[in-house]
Amino acid sequence: MLNITINTRAFQVAEGATILQAARQAGVSIPTLCNLEHREAIGACRVCLVEVEGARTLMAACATPCTDGMVVRTHSVRARAARRQVVELLLSEHDGYCPTCDRGSDCELRALAEEMGIASLPFEGRKARAHLDASTPALVRDNGKCIKCRRCVSVCGEVQGIGALFPQGRGFQTVIGPAFTRDLDSVACVQCGQCAAICPVGAITEKSSIPDIWKAIEDPARHVVVQTAPAIRAALGECFGYAPGTRVTGQMTAALRRLGFDAVFDTNFAADLTIMEEGTELLTRLKRALVDKEPVALPMFTSCSPGWINFAEFYFPKFLPNISTCKSPQQMFGAIAKSYYARKIGKRPEEITVVSVMPCTAKKFEAQRPEMTSSGTCDVDYVLTTRELARMIKEAGIDFRALPDEAMDAPLGLSSGAADIFANTGGVMEAALRTAFEIVTGRELPAANLHVASIVGLEGLKEAALTIHGAKPEWAFLEGVELKVAVSHGLGNARRLLEHISAHGSPYHFVEVMTCPGGCIGGGGQPRFTDDAVRLKRIAAIYSEDESKRMRKSHENPDIQKLYREFLEQPLGERSHHLLHTHYAGKQPAVPDQETP
């Protein structure tokens, strides 16, 4: 431990801590625009300058390690003046107009300017060269607003292991973007949106579908339904002043009704459906491998995260046969809404508009994939992020905090607790184990409160093993088998796992991969700013949602059972194969005919 004094207060910090970490431990706020937790500090923005006794110059708090006996003044006249000047310089070259910017009051640069009392700019700097990149279905980049903090570079390269963005040029001419200053569609961008989630300004945002959705809602010829992903209910409240992790399921449902949607449904219904199909697929693969002695692609990987699918298509196409053929819950819902539900209400598929509310920007990309038209038309028409839904609610003048709790509509609104935990890393795996174990043995999963402890939490790679005893006669081939599973979240962790499997083989039967850190609760479309403290609160809320339900296993959902009786007949049957399953192929990024000058 080191002895350190910050603003006359003496305390101890662990050796290796930076001044910024020590200040936060002491409850002292130091502003920063480039720092990300768990990533090596780069000191790029210089907004965290502090005065250190004995030092000739001001020091960047994020990149300066504490030393024993260090005396720090975080808000001296000199430090505050320097930080103010840094922000003034950033504003002088920032080509942004706050009243119409997507970030608005959510902008970290604007918030710092307000905190520092900056009412006018003493500098008239050149503006950064504006270039609007709307080449992808999910994301929009505006180079004129970029402040070169390099957060997007860190999260894309170090956390996600993609490297689609990096600095090019020097000094004022520096540009953050894809190679050769091309657009995003020319590189292997997986559309995860983590860059948009951590950008402090409006330089990277999701591509908005709000105008199209308003138009559909107001069209009397359209029957517009909405589905909401499980992660939304643990995060949407943050946009309306609630603490992270506050469950707002009922208020969210009420708000969606007041926006004018004809029916409010739950992606969780389709998550339960996914478990029925995916669990059956896993057991079928195991039977083919263990009984029929056929060559089978194992381990089987989950398929509900579209950023992960993109990642595998770009970087690990040899593992595509291992990925479950199940569509994601979002796409399963769309296919069922435009077939089963359409029949029930006497509508043609093309008369129904399906809107999804997702924590994920990659879902925008997924919805327009050519594979996702099994209903005869586009299965999901529009995708909103959590942030976009909050904007729609505010635009409609709805007092969210005053809304009553309301229930979702039938028949696609009922779900189990197992579907809720799809939002969390490890949740899809746990939901699958709850159902698969009970199908095979007739007994409930032997885990405390149905939670598989070893796959809960934010560790990047997690494992579990479950030995099957007392298998039913039809599943006797699994008797004594130790079912081994793995869970990965964040594509950097997925890369390490796949590289290890490529080099050494796999002991696993089933692997869950989630694109974003923490799973969907940390998705690229969630309220900003998401760090581990926020992720843990959202995760706790999702587990609480699960535990509050009497029905906590997907196969117990009576409306899912009814769906099979009335329409699908059986998991992996002919109709479900057509509507709910697909395959993917390896791909390369598009290359423009000529480089952008």
Image: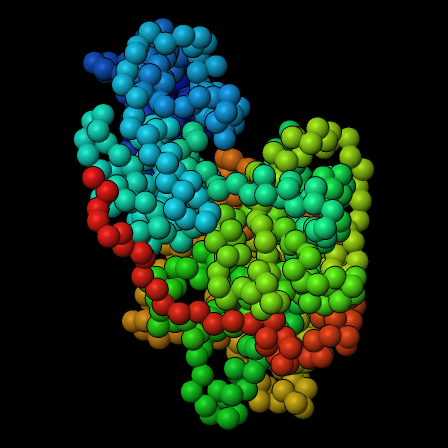
Extreme residue in the bottom direction: 292
Residue at 44 percent across and 69 percent down: it is 584
Q: Position of residue 301 (x, y in %)?
A: 48, 69
Q: Position of residue 322 (x, y in %)?
A: 44, 74
Residue 236 shown left or right of residue 300 in the figure? right
Give 416 or 203, whichever is nearer the viewer. 203
Quadrant in which residue 480 is drawn = bottom right
Give the camera-side residue of 213 and 193.
213
Where is 378 relative to 536, above or below? below
Q: How many marks?
A: 0
Residue 500 visible (yes or no): yes
Task: Give the quadrant of residue 81.
Answer: top left
In which quadrant is the C terminus drawn? Answer: top left
- Furthest toward the left, the residue is 170
Q: Name the image quarter holding residue 84.
A: top left
Rendering coords of residue 374 (x, y %): 58, 69
The answer to whether residue 158 is visible is no
How far from the left and from the top, in percent, is residue 461?
44, 59
User: From the image, which quarter does the N terminus lie in?
Assistant: top left
Q: Nearer the viewer, residue 80 or 198?
A: 198
| Residue at point 40%, 53% (across, down) | 190
Image point (30%, 10%), residue name? 123
Which residue is at the far front?
221
Relative to 270, residue 70 above or below: above
Rendered position, 210 above or below 465? above
Left/right placement of residue 461 relative to residue 445 reads left
Q: How is the image coloured?
A: rainbow
Residue at 21% over, 46% down: 595
